[in-house]
């Protein structure tokens, strides 16, 4: 099994591919929105956050799912998800 259970979804409109993975925990949306305030578009009600990180668009969902847009490979996506995890880990539900 690959890290974060990643899988390629489809080609990305902006180039590259869209890769989806999953964190081991759900997110507390209020805390996630606070952590990414000013950098992300966030909807606590819908349970989704969208922002850019290192030239990739990232979408994070309340249930722990994460989509990385515009990466070249699944391995690249895993590296991006590792970076993102460090940024958002304080918003994981215990």
Image (cartoon, rainbow, N blue to C red):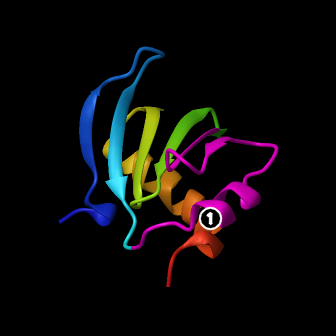
The quarter in which the N terminus is drawn is bottom left
Residue 87 shows in the view = no
Is 79 situated left or right of 7 in this image? right
Is residue 46 shown in magenta?
yes
Is 38 situated left or right of 24 in this image? right
**Residue positioned 31% across, 65% down in the render:** 3
Q: Residues within 10 Å of mark 1 (few under 14, many from 20)?
A: some
Q: Residue 59, how many percent across, how many down?
A: 50, 42
Name the residue beneath numbered marker 1: 88
Is 3 situated left or right of 39 in this image? left
- SS type, badge 1: helix
Is 88 situated left or right of 69 in this image? right
**Residue positioned 74% across, 60% down in the render:** 35
Is residue 5 shown in magenta?
no
**Residue positioned 50% across, 85% down in the render:** 94
Residue 12 shows in the view = yes
Q: Residue 52, how many percent across, how many down?
A: 64, 37
Q: What segment is highlighted magenta in the picture?
A: 25-51
**Residue positioned 51% across, 62% down in the render:** 82
Q: Residue 89, how many percent across, how many down?
A: 59, 72
Q: Residue furthest front?
A: 45
- Of 17 and 65, nearer the camera is 65
**Location of residue 33 by image quarter:** bottom right
User: Vertically, is 87 above or below 14?
Assistant: below
Q: Residue furthest left?
A: 1
- Of 62 and 36, nearer the camera is 62
User: Vertically, is 18 above or below 82?
Assistant: above
């Amino acid at each position: 099994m690959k890290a974060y259970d990643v899988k390629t979804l489809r080609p990305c409109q902006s180039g590259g591919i869209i890769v989806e993975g999953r964190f081991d925990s759900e997110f507390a949306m209020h805390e996630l929105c606070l952590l990414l305030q000013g950098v992300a578009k966030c909807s606590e009600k819908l349970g989704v956050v969208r922002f850019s990180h290192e030239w990739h668009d990232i979408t994070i969902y309340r249930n722990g799912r994460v989509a990385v847009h515009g990466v070249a490979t699944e391995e690249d996506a895993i590296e991006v998800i590792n970076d993102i995890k460090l940024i958002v880990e304080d918003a994981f539900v215990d």
